[in-house]
Image (cartoon, grey):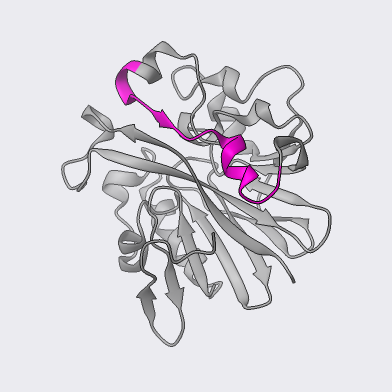
Amino acid sequence: MSHSVHRLHLASVNLQGQFNPPTYLDTRIDVYAYLVITGSSDVLLIDTGVGEGNEYIERVFEPHRTPIAEELARFGLETTDVNLLVNSHLHFDHCGNNQLFPSAEIFVQSNELAIARTPRYTVAEWFDYDGARINAVSGDREISAGIRLLSSPGHTPGHQSVLVETVNGNVLVAAQAAYTADEYLRGGDPAEQAHKGLEDQYLRSISRLKSVAAREIYFSHDDRGSVIEKEEKFLPPGGVKT
């Protein structure tokens, strides 16, 4: 498949209190989305970053944003060109700009949609707004030729990753199935990263994602990608196609 995957930097946010476990090396992290330009007419965006207008998010996380329209413009695209949108999960830093994409069908796991509609989980109006074209998915699904959603619960009840076929092999956008490439390669840190009660599922999801033998694997909060050849190793920062 003549698909290509590109990293977009959408924001950086502060981590504080319960959001900053003691083993984290940084107290400010980057937020990445991924753009998939296909060999057909489909344009896929995986996650949409941090929205605006929520006082709690502004005060606690102090987001510094990169306008998503500027990131798309690097590829000659506008927000209206995106017709497929995947939310890996519905935490505030992954769904905040969904409504900027009026042409997009939005794919969310049904388990994630259910918990996101409960109090204190996320900023509901950032994904659950009038006109949102939400397609609730249960499990794996091919959403375009060579692009497949992979259910990977653990970080949240309905987390999902995306497998993309390219001419050079499979690319996996693991998103936040693991927090960093280091964590992914060592099998997971569920005590820090898993939703309460999903620690075992978190580990199983990472194991399952490893089984697809993707050539490249990318993450929501780490700009390194791991390369799977005869052995696992890291790409340097910026190693993903941009």
Q: Where does the image place residue 39, in percent across and percent down from the top left?
A: 79, 64
Residue 103: tell me if it is visible. Answer: yes
Q: Residue at x 43, y 88 (%)?
A: 230
Q: Is residue 54 above or below residue 144?
A: above
The part of the image, by quadrant, that contains residue 110 is top right
Residue 67 included in the magenta stretch of the image: yes
In the rendered image, the residue lying farthest to the left is 22
- Quarter of the image for the C terminus: give it: bottom right
Q: Residue at x 30, y 63 (%)?
A: 182
Q: Is residue 1 above or below residue 22?
A: below
Q: Is residue 84 above or below residue 58?
A: below
**Left or right: where 135 falls relative to 60:** right
100 vs 200, nearest the viewer? 100
**Left or right: where 226 falls relative to 62:** right
Q: Residue at x 56, y 32 (%)?
A: 95
Residue 45 included in the magenta stretch of the image: no
Q: Where does the image place residue 175, in percent across and percent down from the top left?
A: 49, 51
Q: Which residues are magenta?
A: 59-77
